[in-house]
Image (spheres, rainbow, N blue to C red):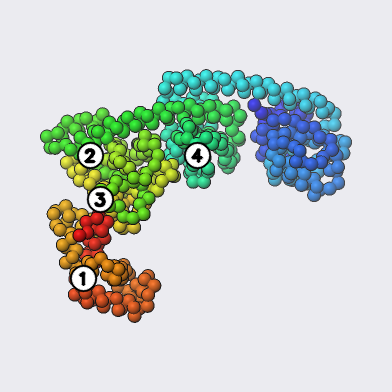
Amino acid sequence: MSLTMREILELDPLSRGRLVAGAKGLDNEVRWVTIVEVLEDVGRLEPGELLVTTAYQLNEEPLRQRKYVEGLAARGLAGLAVITGFYLDEIPAAMREAADEVRLPLIDLPPTLNFSDITHAVLERLVNRQYELLHASEEVHSELTRLALEDAELAELVELMGRWTTGEVVLWNASGLPVEGRPSDATQEVLAGLIETSPAGNPSEGVPLPTLRFVLDDGECLVVPVRAGPNLHGYISLAQSRGRVRELEAVALRHAATVAALLLSRREAVNAETTRLRGEFMDAVLQAGERDRSGVVARAADFGCHLDRPHAALILGSGRDSEPPSQGVSPGQGWNGDRARVASLVSDVLCSRVEGFLLRQGKGQLVVLAEVTSAEEAQAVGEALLSLTDSLEEPLRVGVGMVAHDLMDFERSVREAEVAYRLGPLIGSEQGVVSYESLGLFRTAVELEQKGVSLDELCRTALGGLFADDQRIRRLRGTVDAFFSNHGNLQATADSLYVHRHTLRYRLKRVESITGRDLKDPMDRLSLHFGLVLFRYLEATNNLT
């Protein structure tokens, strides 16, 4: 365990000196004391050293004095003590100014002090502190081992760390959401930046994750990744609003990270079993009839759910589809990762966003039935689930069904969420949140199909000759689609297609000729537009004949 410069100044004989500059660095940690008579290469000094010198050769050159102090700070030295009265009558202003700027404590020692007395006092205290650290570390390890053996709650771990430290202790999941503890705004910013930029947020098997230190305004934040094998379960942080994190606190935090990994691994296993039970119960909910209502609502209380309140379904899966998905192909077949861990991360997000939910694992996707009061709240839950993209190293897409106000309508919301997920790429949302309400005319196509309307026949009628599937007709379909997308603006359409306006006019006349539609007539334009929507829907669902 190291000493701080503040503590060093309390030791005899160093207490006979006086601090003349660098007061903001008094929390610098001292790991060794070095005596140097002739000042030469600072590159030979080590971080954490307290340098004691008579400042030989520094008595007449202010620029050299300044650069020397700056060089010591750059090397990470803890402080500089100058014995005056030999080569310097007093510590020069250039050294004092530089020490204040770089926060390097600068001490003026009287010439009556012996080097040996200084060395003996500092090293004796350092050895004693190391023994104290070892003893305290064993106590911390013993307490934390007890928690692990007793299968304690995560809150107990954070509470114990609060007794061993003087700062703010928070346990986070791998997405950067607090699991236990109350983080300050500054700590939340630290974690957000870590998730976004640090290699620790993207671990590879066999590579240990580092302990990370972040400077706060007047303090420090220490973050230790919580990892078991190749899996990053989260982080545990300790923030000091004033001063630095002490060495014992850092040791305790690293021990706590190991125990947290064990507890979180167990928690994920429990979550996996809970997810399985929730999934089985969700099947029962979706298949329930009116006669089963009271029994299902009563059972839901065991899962913390209130099925007599409004719910909406959400489908979470991979957003890697390069082409619109077809029927019969499970969304998110390329969704990698441990399914239990994925379900655990999703559960953590949902617990922080909604009062009650059911979760079922499908093939390559997760089905959620969440208690919400509005479409806006359902959308917000979907956005929260997207925050898992970084943790899972996978682009995600969320389909959201409409809010169902009655138990008998929950199954409808699930179907709507599945449709929204599947058709997301058709409206340019391969990744992100796609609501059933946002599908526009594609939603109309789905509902017509559900009512038994032949979309193929309807599409043929609307498109006429544009229904054919050859290269020339595909180009004309693309032309009229671009024309509608640009609100009938000829120049904008020509620019988007990289063709001349005369070429565009020719193509549009061909469209009118083979369809029998007048592009100036609003009803004809509406029919053609809806026909193109139906064609894209049939193409995506492999229902073209």
Which residue corresponds to mark 1?
465
Name the amino acid type tagged 3: Gln
Q: Quadrant of residue 210?
A: top right
Tell whether 152 sits left or right of 439. right
Task: Compute the Cα span from label 3 to label 1.
Answer: 26 Å
Label 4: state its secondary structure: loop
Question: Which callout, 4 or 3, points at the residue further toward the start of the chain?
Answer: 4
- Mark carried by residue 309: 2
Label 3: state its secondary structure: loop
Tell whether 74 sits left or right of 415. right
Question: Which callout, 3 or 1, points at the residue further toward the start of the chain?
Answer: 3
Question: Which callout, 1 or 2, points at the residue further toward the start of the chain?
Answer: 2
Q: Do the numbered discs 1 and 2 sit on residues whose CB atoms are within 8 Å?
A: no
Q: Do the numbered discs 3 and 2 sit on residues whose CB atoms are within 8 Å?
A: no
- Mark carried by residue 327: 3
Which of label 1 and label 2 is nearer to you? 1
Which of label 4 and label 1 is nearer to you? 1
Q: Quadrant of residue 520?
A: bottom left
Label 2: state its secondary structure: loop
Going by the picture, which residue comes out furthest to the right?
86
Question: Which callout, 3 or 2, points at the residue further toward the start of the chain?
Answer: 2
Task: Compute the Cα span from label 4 to label 2.
Answer: 41 Å
Which residue corresponds to mark 4?
203
